[in-house]
Structures are given as C-alpha cells and as structure tokens.
Amino acid sequence: MQNKLVPISEFGLLGSSFYWDRHEDYGLTKAELAGVGVAGKEIYVSPEIIPSLTKVDNELQKRGWRLYLREGYRSEGMYKLLYKKRIAKFGQEITDKLLNMKNMPHTSGKAVDVSIWDEHSDSEIRLCKTGDGPESLIRGFYDESDDVEGQRCHELQEYLISLMLKQGFQLGIKNEFFHFNYRPEEWLSGETDG
Ligand SMILES: [Zn+2]
C-alpha cells in the first residue's frame, strides 16, 4: 500500500484532478475513477514534496500567478485504466510515447503534473496551444515556433521547468513539459528513470 499521502489543499496549494475534471473527454466514468482511488478533485501527494511545491508557488506569486497542480499520486489501477482509455482514444503509439507504464512514477506520490494559474483572470494559463495534439505535450515542440502564441508557450514552459528544477524536481523520461519527479538525491548524477 501507498506511503502516507496528504491533500494539497491542506497546505494552501491550488489544483484540481485533471482526469476527474476531464473524465468525459477520456471516456472515463466517475464510478471507474472511484474504483481506482480517484473520488474527487483533490490531489494527494507525498508530504515530502510539499515544501518544494510551496517554494515554486511562492515564486510564481511574485508575478500574480500560482502553481496549479493537475495530478499527484496515481494508483497502479489508475495507470492501467488510463492506458486502456488512452489507447482507445489516441492509439497505441502516442499512448506509449506519453504514458510511462514501466516506472509508473505517479504511484510514488512524488511525481506531479503542473500548470500555472493566473490570479488576475482566475483561470489556468495555457502552456500549449489547443488543437496541437498530444505531440505538443513534449518539451521542445514549440522551440522553433514562429508565431507569437507558440513562442509564448515555449517561454512559459521553460520558465516553469526552471522553477521546478531549482526545487529538486526533474522531468520524466517521456519529457512532457508539465511532468516532474522529485529526485533531489539524483540532482548531481543526472539520472532519470521516471
Ligand atoms: Zn505525469
């Protein structure tokens, strides 16, 4: 069974479970989600990563923004369910490109998917463009972008990544711009397997 987990809201952090909010888009029912441990919007993480998340949140607040969590702990059952649903929706190839079924990093409670919340407009800031598809979730997709919106996505992604790396997080092997594993002990070795 999972180590101790804590709800992020208890620590003043913002977030809302991505798959809870978007379940219909992925062909998920609330009953299916409840069956794999997702019973609402709340996000749970290992208490070990709370101080680092809070530091990133504090840094973003200087710009009128907030750290916005989209996922934290994910059970093995949830991984398996998502794998099935994502293959049905996107096909095998792109599913394998994005979902790390070998390591299942979110089962540790120390992996998070994050975004930025804008306090002024009270909405999530888009870090990739609508309609660019699953490939746009991989870091580097907008590096060579020649339109303003794409360049903005590139800058925001790199800014968020830099804040997270400073607090001991690393990107995972799938290289999604929003997925981070807490690995301060591997900071110097440069290893990454999540
Ligand atoms: Zn993730």
Image (cartoon, rainbow, N blue to C red):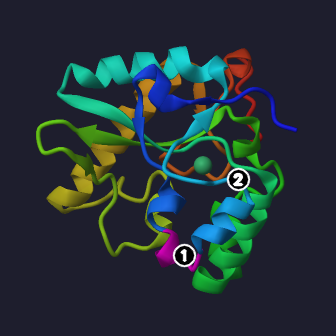
Task: In the rendered view, tell whether residue 75 sits above or below residue 93.
Answer: above
What residue does disc 2 label?
37
Front position in the image: 159 or 144: 159
What residue does disc 1 label?
26
Identified at 62% across, 74% down, the residue is: 94
Q: Quadrant of the N terminus?
A: top right
Residue type indicated by callout 1: Tyr
Magenta span? 23-28
Disc on the earlier residue, 1 or 2: 1
Marks 1 and 2 sit apart, C-alpha to C-alpha, by 17 Å
Structural crowding at the residue carrying mark 1, measured as other residues with C-alpha within 10 Å and reported as few (<14), some (14–19) or many (≥20)? some
Structural crowding at the residue carrying mark 2, measured as other residues with C-alpha within 10 Å and reported as few (<14), some (14–19) or many (≥20)? some
> Residue 57 location in percent, x, y?
37, 24
Task: In the rendered view, tell whether residue 178 sits above or below residue 63.
Answer: below
Q: Is-magenta flag for residue 115?
A: no
Disc 2 element: loop
Does residue 180 show up? no
Q: Is-magenta flag for residue 27?
A: yes
Name the side, left or right, on which 64 lies relative to 52: left
Q: Quadrant of the C terminus?
A: top right
> Residue 93 location in percent, x, y?
68, 77
Identified at 83% across, 54% down, the residue is: 102
Identified at 75% across, 50% down, the residue is: 75
Task: In the rendered view, tell whether residue 134 sits above or below residue 102.
Answer: below
- Camera-near label (1 vs 2) is 2
Residue type indicated by callout 2: Gly
Q: Quadrant of residue 168?
A: top right
